[in-house]
Image (spheres, rainbow, N blue to C red):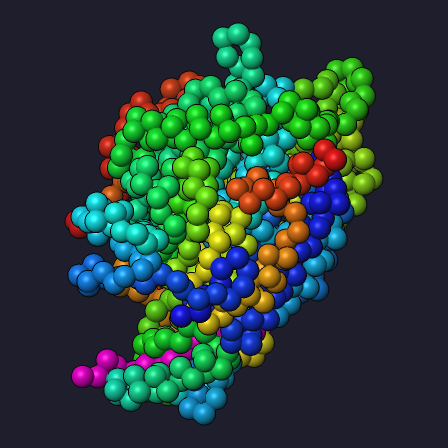
Amino acid sequence: MYRYDEFDARFVAERVEQFAGQVARRLAGELSEDEFKPLRLMNGLYLQLHAYMLRIAVPYGTLAPRQLRKLADVARRFDKGYGHFTTRQNLQLNWPKLKDVPAILRELATVEMHAIQTSGNCIRNVTADHFAGATPEEIEDPRPLCEIIRQWSSLHPEFTFLARKFKIAVGAALHDRAALLYHDMAVEIVKNGEGRTGYRVSAGGGMGRTPYIAQLMCDFVEREDILAYLEAVLRVYNQDSRRDNIHKQRIKILINTIGAEEMRRRVAREFEEIKAQGYLTLPQAELDRIAAYFAPPQFETIAEPVAEYEAAKRQDARFADWCAHNLAAHRAPGYAIATISLKPIGGVPGDCTSEQMEAIADLMDRFGLEEIRVSHEQNLVLPHVRKRDLPAIFARLCELGLGTPNAGLVTDIICCPGLDYCDLANARSIPVAQKIAGRFADLKRQEEIGELKIKMSGCINACGHHHAGHIGILGVDKKGVEYYQLQLGGSGAEDAAIGEIMGPGFTAEEITDAVERVVDEYLRLREPGERFLDTYRRVGMEPFKNVAYLEQLHAVY
Amino acid sequence: MTKGLQIFTANRLIDGRVVYWQGARWAESLAEAEIFDDSEAAEGALKAAQKWVAERVVVGIYLFGVRLEEGVAVPLKARELIRAAGPSVRRDLGKQAEGLYRPPPVHSQIRHAQTTPGPARDPFDVSI
Amino acid sequence: MPFIRNGDWADDDFATVADEAPLPDGAVIVSLARFRKERETLLARNAALGVRLAAPESPETLGDDLHRLSVVVLEFPAFKDGRALSWARLLRTRLGYTGEIRAQGAFLIDQLAHMTRAGFTTFDGDARITPEALAHALAEITYPYQPAPDGKKTIRELRAG
């Protein structure tokens, strides 16, 4: 993974001192709260319901053991001993004190971590496929480009006071595991007809109040021109976006107002010029230099089938279950990609204690695993695990409460913190996710249901990505009472789609039953091989709507 | 033009903790809060309290509605109940774990439209 | 009113004239609207001329007249409105403007480094904007990642040695 040189280290150290200065000026009254708020947001610091919240950047979701240990340490010393992994691959601490944040940032800097631009109206953490570098189906590892974009976007002099936030994701695989088309800008690594590698750029995706799928800006940008192209898109956005209505200030609104064609035209104009001036040309040598940091570990030559692994599956049914759901194919024979579920039935989705983080770091050291990933589905992923090590790893994970075999299943729910934590929320989300997970806890039932992505947000800001859920749930406030709206048919994969709202909301009491009735109806209607999403696409909303509102119908009679 | 009973609250600048105006100082427990039954007095006190913002003690002062149950102030909205107590999904965290939250005597605060008959549910019954 | 030009206190040697007010002798700054209306007169005057652009107004609309201006004033209606940063960069790059670019309105010390890199030379802000604050702001981040019109060496260039 990327290692800081003296320039990167100095940059982060100086940014920390700059932030410390801003905190001091705030406490001394030289900055009002209105002035300080955007500045602290640019260092990931929110003021939430109970306390401040610090969002620590995990660039492209990649962590080394020493970084995981430092997160555990910081959470223990400055917070309440746990953190929450987010839908943008970052980590949130829920209880830091403002006066401690400079010290927290200094600690993080010692392991090349920071909270730069994890919030605010600037370019945010660049996210990528959590299977990067390990999956057999990628053109190349997307993370070197993420790192290049990260550096280009850090304290960018022109793009630090944008109209709204700007989220970029990079993909390189057939299967989109990063919800690319829901981003303000999506960069897909592709090969053109001549076999040359370049970038397909789309823009204008987004969740929130008005969800959009990103539209194509350029189907092939040459490697060396990518930064010039990104700069062109950002410049058009910064210049032309509205500034009068906070709900209309994302790039998705701009593109949908002027049209994709006009946007492409404006971007092309800037792009031609920036490219001609040459100062943002990305030389192949620089790409290669960064890519070298991301070279995968030397893979052992391991023959399949791996005897110890196969035997363990035969002997231990729990291990077999976990392998069936939490492993994905690796490009090297004898290896697997292992998902550590942070969705134990009844637990808080995405939360991880300091003890768990440290134990995972120890596990990584024990088995020579140099990297762990955070997925935007709020789980952790060990990208390069030898199959023969899996039984021992699984045993340890079980001891830690991290062995839930539900990756990608109905109880693997994406869920925002909601009204239990968040100042923006309208309703609680975590207890609903817990109740639903509890209802479907039986693994056989989950296996019968198959792939079903439930995503839940506690407010319209959609941090839980509910628009992209096969079943999406949105918490709303109706006269002080928590209600929950269902959406069906969303997808955050390469077949991106926005879920359709079913109808009036359900109460907290009703929502679990409603979801269960929808799932049961899917099981009743499905044809062989159909996931929930496929059945929905075939039969539409009507059958599900009918059963969901059944209880209310009975109540009428 | 009474708006009902109100309390005003803020977050402390230095550490973000939820505080309530107690009449002479900022208190950490909702139970200590001064209850205004006259909205003019409430607005007046709110205005006076802005000095605590200028002095960098608190940020974001606002009024919210409560009702009284056996003399105890109970917030009308879920958000304020959660702010007063702590996360409903982590009873070991927040004011509820620090002896700074007294549950209301009658548990009907977060009003779920109950479809099954029976006594009013505990608002923090996480098996909602 | 004193402000900061090229790093130090300076006096404003221009008169900023409201749209309906009569033009005094000497150097003046007028709005874009007035410049469009009275272009001939203004350009014919034997005195320095500047145009003040509101946040949504692109300097491109000035066309070739740009090079006859001694100063372009870019408005910050609110410090969160960063459009002027793009306008300044545009002025320095595509439009090749070498005159004074002045920031006027609401901006924070914390933006001065970005603004300088974008091409601003003059700052007309509130009492907190002082030469000391500017010097301190410019020194906070030693090496930038991105190239900018200020010509400061980027981290990539420094790495290349």
Residue B105 image-quadrant placement: bottom left
Residue in the image at 63% along x and 30% along y: A144
Residue in the image at 30% along x and 48% along y: C56
Residue in the image at 49% along x and 21% along y: A221
The N terminus of chain A - image quarter? top right
Left or right, residue A496 beside residue A134: left
Foreground pick, A333 / A98: A98
Highlighted range, magenta: B1-14
In percent of width and height, residue C122 lies at 46, 57
In percent of width and height, residue C116 lies at 52, 52
Foreground pick, B103 / B15: B15
In percent of width and height, residue C144 lies at 62, 45
The reply to whether residue A482 is in sight is no
The reply to whether residue A295 is in sight is yes
Residue B43 image-quadrant placement: bottom left
Residue B74 image-quadrant placement: bottom left
Residue in the image at 62% along x and 36% along y: A147
Residue C126 lies, with reference to residue A397, above or below; the image says below
Residue A449 lies, with reference to residue B99, above or below; the image says above
Tell which residue pokes out farthest to the front in this image. Answer: C46
Number of residue marks: 0
Left or right, residue A398 beside residue C104: right
**Residue A433 on the magenta span:** no
Residue A62 lies, with reference to residue A98, above or below; the image says above
Tell which residue pokes out farthest to the top in this image. Answer: A194
In percent of width and height, residue A492 lies at 44, 33
